[in-house]
Image (tube, coloured by chain):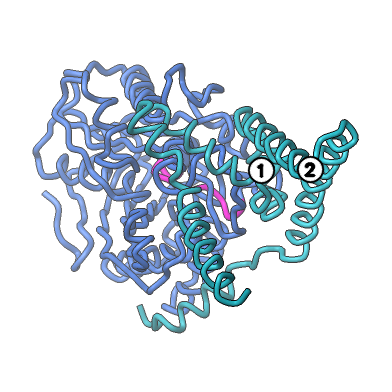
Chain colours: A cyan, B blue
Amino acid sequence: MTISNKDYSHLADKKSPDSPMLKNLIFAFTTGGAICVIGQIIINLCKSKGLSFEDASTVASVSLVILSVILTSFNLYNKIATFAGAGTLVPITGFANAVVAPAIEFRSEGYIMGLGAKMFVIAGPVIVYGTVSSVLAGIIYYFIK
Amino acid sequence: MGTRCGRQTVALSTKPTIYAFTSIAGKKEGEGPLGNQFDMVFEDAFLGEETWEKAEMRLYEKCFSQILQKGSLSPSDIDYIISGDLLNQCTSSAFGMKDSSIPYLGIYGACSTMAESISLAAMLSDGGFSAGNILSMAGSHFCSAEKQFRAPLEYGGQRPPSAQWTVTGAGAVCISHGGPIEITHITTGKITDLGIKDANNMGAAMAPAFVSTLTAHLKETGREPCFYDLIVSGDLGLIGKEIALELTGKEGFDISSNYNDCGAMIFDPQKQDTHAGGSGCGCSACVLCGYILPEMIKGTFKNVLFIATGALMSPTTTQQGESIPSIAHAVALSKLQ
C-alpha cells in the first residue's frame, strides 16, 4: 500500500459520516424529558395521596425501574433507545435496562456463572465509580462545610 | 498441480470446480434486496433452539443437509469439510458438523472465512488430495455475534452510522471436478493494518486488506480489472466500499464499473436500519451462494473475483486499544462453457 497510516486515517474519517448530532440531541432531549415528566407525574400523584416527597420520589424511581424492566423484557427498550440514545441511557430506566439486558442474555449460561455473574457487566462500572465518587464527595464535603 | 504466479497467487491447473452450492438466511436478510435469492429463509431467529449459540449450530446443520440434497450427495461422497464461523473456538461450525462423520478442518478467518475455505478446498482438490468432493462452508448469526462482540441484544445502545449489521445466514459450496464454475486462481491475503481502532468502523479497517489482495492478484495474474464482470468484496459495507474505490484508484486500477460489495448488496440501509450494511462470515457466504453463483450459471457474470474480507480482532484486543489487523482472500471464478 502506498498510503501512510496518517493519510489513511484522514481518508477513513472523511468517508465515515458523523452521527446526526442535532437529530440525536432533539430525540434525547424529548425522550429523556418525557421519562422525567412521567416520574414527576408519579411523584405528584403520590403526594396528592398523602405520601411525603421522599417516599413519593422512591415510588417514582421504583415505578420507572419496573417500567424499564418490562420494556426490556419485551425487547422494546432497545428499539426506543435506537432513536432516543442518551435520552433512554441517562435516566434510571437506562440503568435498569443495563442490568436486565445482560441478565436475559446470559441466562443461558446458568443462574450462577451466567445471570448472576454477567448481570453487572455493563452497570458494574457505574456502581463502582459512582460509589467511589460519592465517598470522595463526602470527604470533600466533610472538610469544607 | 497448480503453479505459483507470484508471492500470493496460485493458478490451479486441474480445473477444480464449484459443483453445487446452497444458501440459507434469516428473516431480515430474507426481507432485503436479495431475499428471494436464498434457498431457505427461516423466520425464527432461534431456529427452534433455546440459545443463540445452538441456533447458529442448527444453521450449519441445515446448510449441510441442504447442500447434500442439492448436490444429490451422501456424507460418504465428501472427503473434507472446511468450515468456520465467528464464535470463540469456532463452536457453531464444529458442533454443527459433529455428527457428519466427515474429515473436518475448522478455520478462522473472521468474515473472510468463506474465501479462505474455498481457497483451501480448491488447493486440496488441485493438489490431488481429493478425488471426490470437498465442502466449504461459513456462516454467522446476528444475535450470537452481538452477544460475543458487542452488547446484549436487549441493551439500549445507539449504533453509529459506520456500524454494520452481522448477517444471519450461511453458505456452502461443494468443490469437485466437472461442475459448471471453475476456480482458476487463488490469491491468499497478507495481514494489513493501517491503524484503524474503531470496532464500529469495520469497513474502514478492512478496505486496505481488500485493495492489497486485489492489486496483488491483478499484478501476479497479469489480468486487468475489466477481465472480471464482477469484482466483489465480502463485507466492506457502504463506507468501506467508497474507501476501497478511492484506494484502488490510488494504486492505479479503475474498478468503478464492475465493483460491488456483498455487505452493501444484502440489506437496504434506508428501509432496514442497517447503517453501513451487512457483515459477518454469513454475509459473503450468503451473497456468493445465493446471488453470485446462480447469476454466473444464468450467464449474467462470466468471470468473477470474489474477495472476502475479515477483521482479525477480538473484543479483548479492542478493549486494550489495539488497532484492527485485517485480511482478504481472493478466489477467481470462471463459468465454463
- Circle 2 packing at 10 Å, graded few (<14), some (14-19), many (20+), is many
- Identify which amino acid the numbered label 2 is placed on: Gly
Q: Relative to B154, is B62 on the left or the right?
A: left
Quadrant for the C terminus of chain B in the image: top left
Distance between the Cα atoms at labels 2 and 1? 11 Å
Mark in the foreground, 2 or 1: 2
Nearer the observer, B208 or A27: A27
Q: Residue at coordinates 41% horizontally, 38% vertically from top-left? A: B140
The residue sitting at the right extreme is: A48
Q: Residue at coordinates 79% horizontally, 48% vertically from top-left? A: A36
Nearer the observer, B112 or A97: A97
Asked whether B78 falls inside the magenta stretch, the response is no
Please indicate, yes or no, whether residue A31 appears anywhere in the rendered image.
yes
Judging from the image, what secondary structure is the residue with disc 1 in? helix
Which region of the structure is painted magenta?
B275-284
Residue A85: x %, y % from top left: 67, 53
Task: Identify the image quadrant of residue B177.
Answer: top left
Nearer the observer, B35 or B217: B35
Q: Which residue is mark 2?
A: A39
Q: Which residue is mark 1?
A: A93
Residue B281: x %, y % from top left: 39, 44
Asked whether B277 falls inside the magenta stretch, the response is yes
Task: Identify the image quadrant of residue B218.
Answer: bottom left
Sequence-wise, the earlier of marks 2 and 1 is 2
Chain name for mark 1: A
